[in-house]
Every structure is written in structure tokens, then in C-alpha cells.
Amino acid sequence: MFASIREHLAASAPHDAVRAAHHAAAAHGKDVSAREEKSAAVVFEGTAVERFRQALEAVAGHCSVVRGEAAAADALRRIILERGARRIAVSDSPLARRIATLAEANSGEESELIDDAGAAELFDCDLGVTGAQWGVAETGTLVLESDAERHRLASLVPSAHVAVIEARSVRQTLGEVLRALGSGGAERLSRTVTFITGPSRTSDIELTLAIGVHGPAALYVIIIEGEGGTDGG
Amino acid sequence: MRVSLFITCLVDQLWPSVGASAVEVLRRAGCEVVFDERQTCCGQPAFNTGYRNEARRLARRFIEIFEDGGADAIVSPSGSCTAMVHHFHELFGDDEAWCKRAEALAARTYEFGAFLVNVLGVDDVGASFKGPVTWHDACHGLRDLGVREEPRRLLRNVRGAEFVELPNADACCGFGGTFSVKYPEISVAILDNKIDAIEKAGVRAVVSGDASCLMQINGRLTRNNSSVRAMHLAELLASHE
Amino acid sequence: MQHPTSETFDRNAREALEDVQLRGALRNLATTFGERRKLAILTVEDWEGLRERARASKDETLAHLDKYLKAFAENAERAGAQIHWASDGAEACRVVLDLIRERGATRVVKSKSMATEEIHLNAALEAEGLAPVETDLGEWIIQLAHETPSHIVVPAIHKSKRQIAELFAEKVGVPPTDDVAVLTGAARRILRQSFAEAEVGISGVNFGVAETGTILILENEGNARLTTSLPRTHIAVMGIEKVIPRLEDLDMFLKLLPRSGTGQQLTAYQSLITGTKRRAEDEGPEELHIVLMDNGRSRMLAHPVTRQSLACIRCGACLNACPVYQQVGGHAYGSVYPGPIGAVITPQLSGLRTNAQLPYASSLCGACREVCPVKIDIPELLLHLRAEVTEGTAAGTADQRGPVKSRPLERLAFKLYARAWASPTLYLWGARVARVLQRLVVRDGRIGRVGGLMAKLAPPLAAWTEWRDAPPLAPRTFREQWREEHKG
């Protein structure tokens, strides 16, 4: 296949030269090479966390910003009660486990926490709780890395997903996060990195929006601002 | 400023009054206008249908005629024909000499409305017309040549005419050269969206810079016995109602 | 089931124009996505600069495609993926089939992949007794209906809610309803069974990152995530043009694609998959197979005009903006790739000979070029292909010299026109003769519907005047007037 590619590229060379000559000659009045990478548009006044919340809510996600793990557990408990969630899958993130344990303990007899749920079990769960390694403020996106946390399916199979994230993990732009992900080279990159922006959706039927197709119909993000941690702003 | 008029086949044969109006407006704006009678066609129909040998033949002739006419600028009442001149170099491949000649000529070939505003710096030619008017952006003029604001500025200064912005003014009229007769049903379906918008706009005239669009639009307006007229920019700018 | 082919595009288009429901759906598509796109691009400070950078990146990659593909393959393999090379669609289908057979698998789920539609993978698998299940809602709908996709992003856009409800009632026993949420819920419920049992997941690839060997899949529904994480084996079919240089280049493409295609800032999910899991006890497939497919793509590298076809990121914006697509929809094109991009890549992938109408199915308005996130000059490509059709002159497309479609009368007409129009005398005399002849058809200062013998002698005139008046030639041409006025 490489031979075929090289052969065709070689055939193109004379035509490429003609085109290049024309583009050089024709001054189009736009200096393309001088364009610097510009940061995303609308200058946002406020912290990364605030920006994240706005962006997430714009795509039908729910966002609570709390101080400390106890408050986070409270927020999670409210979600559990509101949804009447019985079987709650939790990833192996220590933060997610601590908060889920606390929340579940206080939400009555009805609910059950399942850690290390296999695929089959997950289909019977009605809520999944995970952490997230990064947040992206400009889009309200969560970034989950498989090397840091085993969780992909808890964030996908149950019909609701709650992600707990520390405020200092929220970055302004996707570009920043991509650079961070790639900074360790190919070997250090997690085998699966998942970006999640809002609940599952489709417009395949008459372009009418339907939320909750194959992925969760509800996404909740609990952002924990703690002492010592910055707001990431 | 010496202007050599590139009349274009459609204007020459179907609407010579548009040519006369363009001359009048250019003179009013202070230009000396000459007309080289050797000119015929820029070759666009051949180029667009894929007959590049024929297009090349006509392009060479065009370049030869216009490049030493001693004019400062070549002005045409057609966006698509002007755009064709700007595309001439594509016909000459690696023939550097002809490419250079084509590019040199294109650099001083202008669409009528853009010429008035951008080169002469004129956006008021003292025209007057009674009634609301709207503008249809011809595709080549708009997307190939970037002509958008210029005709609107000119129209806004026509006394008595209220300028109305047409919704989807930049939507194609469906002409597309031979497309209009190879796929007439599709051409007319696209056209009817434009006609709908024009009728709803409640204007006395729809104005455009391309005779081909006007042929398409006017053809349907008259078939529908509409009271709306399709006019060329030059015609409107030459009017003194 | 017989699907319309591009060879009958003219007839397909006429039929589509009679379909009131289809035209309503297309109007909805054009308006909705058009408006959303316009709003979405305002959220990027320098949209034009972004397009230029993305195009420059694509140009650089394509100019060294072998190098980037090699790096991609090596890095993917280093991370545990298995790379398979397929020179054409048949080979790709064979590779996929063999992989499934070798593992003794029968339960296959698929996420949306235009590359697999292109090679008719499902049909190939079904011919061997397999029953792959499409899990993207739009793709599942057309699978149930035995149809082909009519749009590269929203494949079932041609179907009304009512038609979909009737389809679900007939094929999967869902009680008829008008409620989109209920229909979607039924799809979720039914397809979950397939996910739970699946042994093999087949996906496409939106971008392949050379630097790391990563494949990126974007989606809104979550079915691609399920398809690529639940089954034991994941097979990803990737066109060779999908490779991009670096991980951080994804930022630029992820900014462009969703905004252009659906007006979203980002789709709900992106999965970046690099090889296979590190530890056996981790979630995810045991095996990842990436099928790198040519199927006519490398041929497009042979000329700068055709090479830009490979920059396409399959966003669908050009379809949404195209006045022709807006009127006739995707099925008329007779290809899984319809609309402007389809009109240029279908002939290049499947041959101009059997797709000779497609380059002409355009008014050359340029709306597509305006909205393309990677600035593909589709009108330039269409003209290039038209020259190929009439004269066989453009390089990089035909396998043979000479015109693809010989249209003797048309060719003769253009030769005569070029000869006559090259001489001012002939030009003027032609006008004079025409002015006399036109008396046969001019009434009340215009040419109305031309029928009968005249129509047979001048079909273009008949085609024009069926719906539009034609202007008569003026009594004197401009040049005759000028000569008069400037005599002496």
C-alpha cells in the first residue's frame, strides 16, 4: 500500500508545482502563515468552575459545586433519593468510593452499593458513580482515563451517571487537556480516554432531540472545592 | 480612468439596454468607456460543462483582445463572467507564459458594481427609482469575487427606492449554466424557493448583477404573471424615475 | 432490495421532487442545521483561521501519507492493536469476516461507520450467515427498513416519525406511537440485549493519531462506547485518509466537526482508544483490530485537485448547505455518500463511468465550499471531473484515456460554439440568423412553452420553457447599437 501511495504522490508532483507557483503569484491579501493560535472566543468572566457549570447546563447536564467531601456526599444522597436509585455501581476511584459510601450509608435501607460490578451486573444498576481525571470548562466536558480509574462502564451502562471531580482538575480548554494527555508520550497515554459532555442524546428521528439513548439519560457532576485546592480559574 | 467594456454574450444578445445602462453609469462616474468589437465570449459555458479545449481557445482570444486595449480596467456587468476571467489560469496548466498573461489580465478585470464602489470609490450615482427593491446575490459574484456589500451600498443610495434585504439572498437561484436544462426540475425547484421569498418581500423589483440569474428568475416571474420585475444593477442605477 | 443508482440520478431526482414528505424533511434539515451551525461558529474566535489550519494540517498529512500511516500503524501495534491492510472493500470485508470466523463468534454489533457502508460490509457478513446489528438509532432504522443511509450524519432523515413508528411496530413489535421519547426508549431497550450478548463490536474511526496510534470515535448516543467496550473483540474499519499527525491536532478538528455538522460544540462522547487494555482485569476488549482501507483513496493522491477530497472529515455540512441535496435528498445520488462531497468522491471511489451524472448534479453555487470545515473546493473538483467525463483530460481519476461519456451532439454543439464565437463575424451572423428563427417561438415579446417539433429540434429550449419563459434575442445586439452610435 505504501508503494501505491508514493507512486500516486509522485504523479501529483508536477501539478503541485504549478499550483504552488500560482498561489505564490496571486496575492490573496490574507497572510495565512501569520495566524497565531487564538484561544476560544467569548472571553469568560469568572472561574473555570463557573464556566464549566454553565457549559454543562447548556447541554442538559446537572452541576453542583460544593465545599468538602461531606457536602459532596450530601449532594449525591439527594440524587439517589430523588431518582429512587436502588443499585449503585461505583468505580475504583478512591474519591468516588468515599463519597458514594458516605452517601449510600445515609440514604436508607433501600439502596445498595456495588463496587467492581461486572458488565452483566451493570445492566441491573440504575446509577453509576465515578470520578473524573479532568474537566474542561469551555465545553463542560469530563475526561476519564482508564489508567487512573476503572470505570468506563459505570459511566455508561446505568441510566444515570454521577461524576465527582475536584475543582483543581478543571482546566479551561480542551487543547490544554489534550496536550497534558499527550505530554508523557504514547507509552504514558491511557489506553482508553473518554470525553463526556452531557447525557446521551440523538436527533435521528425528524431532528427531534431525545435524551438518553444508549448512554445515561442523566448526567450529574459534583465539583468539590476543598481547602488547598484552587478553583482552577 | 479608461474602461474597456466586457459586454458578455447574454447582455449583448438579450439585454443590450443593460450594456447601455452600464456605459451611462460608468460615464456618469467619470470614466471614458471603450468597446472592443472583436470580443465575443469568455468561454464559461464550455469550461463549466467540461470542454476545456474549447474554453481554452476562447480564453486565449479574450486575453489577446483585452490585454493590450490600453484600458486601465476591464469592467463587466456579470459576476460569473468576471469570475471566469479570474479562473483563466486554470486552463493553462504549466504554460507559465499564458498563466502570467491570464493573471495580469484578471488583476484588472472587475465586476461592475464592485468596480464602482471599490475602484472608483463611488456608491451614489444619482439614480432614482420608485418602490421597494431587493437584491439577489449571484453565486459567482458573491463566492468567487466576494461581492456582497458593494451592490447593497449602491442600492441604498437610489432615491425613492426602499432597500429590502431578501431572506436567504445568498441562496442559489438554480441556474448553474447547463444545469438549468440538464436537470430542469431541480433547477426550478431551487428557483421556486427564491421566487417565494421575492414575492413575500413585497418588492417592485429584484435586482442582481448577473444576467444568467436574471434570466432564470425573470423567466419564472413572467411565467407566473408576477408583477415583480427582475432588473440588472446597471439598469436600476441608470434609472431616473 | 434494489436501490437507485447514480446512473438514473435524473429519474431519481424527479421522483424525489414528487415526494412531499421527503421535501418537508429536507427543508427541516437545511433550516435546523443551517441555523445551528451559524450560531455555533460564532463561539470560535477565529473560525476562518481554524479552517485554514485544519486544511494545512490535512494537506501536510496527505502529502506524506505513507509516513504518517506507517507511524500510526507502528504506534498502534506497540500498544497492542493488530493492524490489517486492505487495498479494497472486498478485501476489507474478507478480513473482517475472517476475524469473526476465526473466533467462532456469531453475535456482532456495529456502531455507525460510513466506511463500512461504503464497502457494504453488512451485506457481506449477512451473505455468510451472520446478522450484524446496527446500534446507532438512525442506522438501526434503515437496517430494519432494508434501506441505505440518505445522509452521512443523520442516515434516516428521509423518514418521518410516523414511518419509523410503523416500521418499529412491524419489525420489532413496538406499539405504534407518536412520541419520539417512547420510540427512542424502545430502541434502547431492544438494542441493550444485543450489547449484552455481543462477542464482536465493529466500529469506524473518525481520526487516527499517528503520534500515538490512537483512534478517536465521536458520537452522541453512547452506542459506539458500548460497541467498543463490551464485546471481547473490537474491529475498527478506518479509511487511510483519516490519519492526523498529533494528539493535540484533535483540538482543532473537534472544534470544527461538530459545529459544522450539527451545530454542537462537542458531541456527547469521544472515545480515544490506544491499543488494548494494560491489565487483563481491566474493562474493555481483549483484542483491537484496525483495518486500514484504501479502496480507491490512494488514487486520489495523484493530483492536487483530487487529493483535497481526502481532507473530508465527514461532517455533513456540505449536504445541509447544498440547494440540490435540499431538494432531492440522499437516495437520488445512488451512493452512501450523497450531496456535494458524494458527487465528487463517489465517482472517484467507484469509477466515473458508472457515476458520470454526479459531477453535473450541481449548480456550482459554492455553498458547500463556504461551509466545509477543511475548505475543500468542491466546485473546482466538480469541474475537474466534468472535464474528465467529456475529454478524459484531468489526471488522477480515470483509468482510461478519452471521454468517459461520449455525448456526440453536445460535443458537436460546443465545438461549433467555440469556432463561431472565436470569430466576431460568425458571432454576429449567428445572432442575425437566430433572430429570424426565433420568430417561430416568440409570442408577445417572450418565448413560452415550446413543444412539438421545435422541442425535438432544440431539447434545451423545451427543457427551459417547460417552467420558465425565455427572453427573446433583442432586435439589435449591444455591439450593433454601439457601432451605430459611434459611426464616423
Image (cartoon, coloured by chain):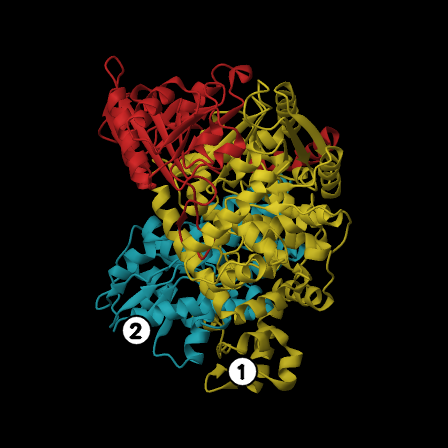
Chain colours: A red, B cyan, C yellow
Residue B29 visible (yes or no) = yes
Q: Which residue is mark 1?
A: C449
Compared to residue C285, the image places residue C133 above or below, namely: below
Residue under the image location 48 percent in, 67 percent down: C21
Q: Residue A161 versus residue A211: which sits nearer the camera?
A: A161
Residue under the image location 62 percent in, 81 percent down: C455
Which label sits on residue B91? Answer: none
Which chain is disc 1 placed on?
C
Compared to residue A182, the image places residue C353 above or below, namely: below
Residue under the image location 64 percent in, 36 percent down: C199
Q: Quadrant of the C terminus of chain B?
A: bottom left
Q: Which residue is mark 2?
A: B204
Residue type, numbered disc 1 = Arg
Q: Position of residue B55 (x, y in %)?
A: 62, 56
Q: Position of residue A177 (x, y in %)?
A: 41, 23
Using the numbered discs, state the Cα–Cα distance from disc 1 to disc 2 in whole angstroms.
26 Å
Residue under the image location 23 percent in, 66 percent down: B162
Q: Are marks 1 and 2 on the same chain?
A: no
Q: Is residue C182 left or right of residue C169?
A: left
Q: Residue C241 versus residue A78: which sits nearer the camera?
A: A78
* Direction top: furthest residue: A228
Compared to residue C377, the image places residue C206 above or below, namely: above
